[in-house]
Image (cartoon, grey):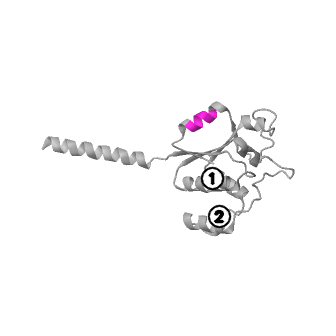
Amino acid sequence: MKRTVLWLAAVFILLSISQLTWAEESTFLIHLKTDLAKDDAQICVAYNIIWGALKEGNKVNVLIDASAVNTYKKGWRGKDQLEDYKIPQRLRKEVARQFKISLNDTPTTYGEYLRLLHKEGAKFYINGAMLVLNKISEKYGDMTNISAGFFQPVTLSEIAKLIKQADSYIAY
């Protein structure tokens, strides 16, 4: 009888621990590698996944890398390619439906969407080496030609740490 009670207690404790682990926040790393000019669907879909992960209570890190860094380069008007890029109405309606929010609470442009994701808690990092390679920055850490003031430049070692620390990794 004593062994049965101890065994049942042990099983209960193990199940409780597994439930606590399952309920913990996960860390997503969304790796944006494709320039808007090459494929606009990549970044657009990524924003939806970022918002979904945030709505589920997850921590989200976003790494802007490779040709995607060009998407956030300021143009001659001081804006990037996405700032005024309209979100299709059908997509806004579907996002509103899935997230159970008002259509008025969905962004109308990808510039608004980016700011919303940041406000909701997504952290944005950008590969500093790629900024130099693409002649967006003259030296590492120079962010004057990047439209989003909240992007944080990261080194190659810091990128490796972001990847290693992620529970889920998705590349676009």
Mark 2 packing: few (<14 Cα in 10 Å), some, or many (20+)? some
Note whether 151 is above or below 101 in the view shown.
above
Horizontal relation, residue 54 to residue 144: left or right: left
Near-viewer residue (19 or 159): 159
Query: Which stretch did the figure color magenta?
Result: 158-163
Q: Quadrant of residue 108?
A: bottom right
Q: Tell me the quarter of the image containing the N terminus.
A: top left
Residue at 68% of width from left, 62% of height from top? 107
* Magenta residue check for 161: yes
Type of amino acid at the residue the image marks with label 1: Ala
Q: Residue furthest left?
A: 1
Horizontal relation, residue 165 to residue 21: left or right: right
- Where residue 59 sits: x, y (%)? 55, 47
State the residue position of label 1. 46
Mark 2 vs mark 1, CA separation in Å: 16 Å
Near-viewer residue (66 or 56): 66
Residue at 76% of width from left, 45% of height from top? 70
Secondary structure type for disc 2:
loop
- Where residue 40 sits: x, y (%)? 70, 55
Near-viewer residue (103 or 66): 66
Label located before the other in sequence (2 or 1): 1
Mark 2 or mark 1: which is in front? 1
Note whether 105 is above or below 27 in the view shown.
below
**What is the chief secondary structure element of the magenta stretch?**
helix
State the residue position of label 2. 106
Type of amino acid at the residue the image marks with label 2: Thr
